Image: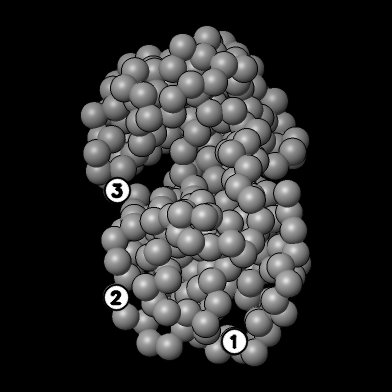
Amino acid sequence: MAVTTSAPLPTTARRVVVLRALGLGDLLTAVPALRAVRRGMPGARLTLAAPKALTALARATGAVDAVLPADGLAPLPPAGPVDVAVNLHGRGPRSHRVLAALSPGRLMAFACTAAPHADGPDWDPDEHEVARWCRLVRAYGFHADPGDLDLAAPRAASPAPGAVVVHPGAAFPARRWPAERFAAVAAALRDGGERVVVTGGPGEAAIARRVVELAGLDPGADLSGRTPLPRLAALVAGARLVVCGDTGPAHLATAFRTPSVLLFGPTPPGRWGPPDRAEHLVLWAGRRGDPHGREPHPGLLEITAGQAVEAAGRALAHTVRGPG
């Protein structure tokens, strides 16, 4: 239950540390809560403890003054006097203890008896990730809008402006739709007159190459390993469409309001899906499972290439084709 804490709002805080030492999608789903904290403590210096690779995107939110490089729940380096620490990382107790080690004047976090931390609202395991962190900061008196997800388009030029971006990778096999199906979608969109590019991180080059080869795309369409995060952000911001699974580029598409077709498997979109907008189409068979599984989830495999192609056509209706 969302409860308002009895302590007053710390509007006079000067040093604030927020923990969100997770991935790309995790950062983007926490943007509304981050912005609420920024607005609620004007004049404070807000430091986000997060992976160093997310620094540029974190600063693009307009809510972060500095990034303290952090990887998971390893101890944080000394941060000097901290007035307020905010746990946007997890339910505790480990994440609570990471912040408590900084000796903050105030810890804002979900209630966790094992930490111990009695302040704050209770954790809801079925809550949407955006709503969860908004509810947490609201309990401390901040105004958070779950729809406040947008980012301004990067200044950097897209490496493939106006292209359809197909991203076949995901952190775990349970969330990876088969390469053959991504290839079928890519080929259909190419045959329909779209420029299609395929992306992937350094560890996803093999699956990206397979999609390009099976789809019969030009080898130059393979951008895997060549789009570090700032370049990937520019690519997604300038794309006509993103087709991917439940992974980071899906949240970039939300942040830039780029039309998207998103393939959900073990995790319901009610937990991690995009906001209810016409330009974001979610395909989900309604079956839950382990998002960290070692095989593609059966529910994900129920989604056909034909369904994805049809959804892509509908999503493209929300874009305007540029010149050339």
Residue 209 as seen in the image, left or right of residue 316: left
Tell me whether the residue at label 2 lies in contact with that at label 1, contact meaning CB atoms closer than 8 angstroms: no
Q: Residue at x 36, y 24 (%)?
A: 293
Q: CA distance from mark 3 to mark 1?
A: 41 Å
In this rendering, which labeled residue sits more in front, label 3 or label 2?
2
Q: Position of residue 313 (x, y in %)?
A: 65, 24
Q: Is residue 316 above or below residue 122?
A: above
Q: Which residue is mark 3?
A: 226
If you read the primary sequence from the N terminus, does the residue marked by circle 2 or circle 1 appear first? 1
> SS of the residue at dot 3?
loop
Q: Is residue 304 above or below residue 233?
A: above
Query: Which label is found at residue 13?
Result: 1
Res. 53 visible in picture: no
Q: Which residue is mark 2?
A: 77
The quadrant holding residue 168 is: top left
Q: Residue at x 51, y 14 (%)?
A: 299
The image's colouring method is one colour
Relative to the observer, which residue lies in front, 309 or 264?
A: 264
Q: Amino acid at mark 1?
A: Ala
- Give the crowd class for mark 3: few <14, some 14-19, many >=20 residues within 10 Å: some
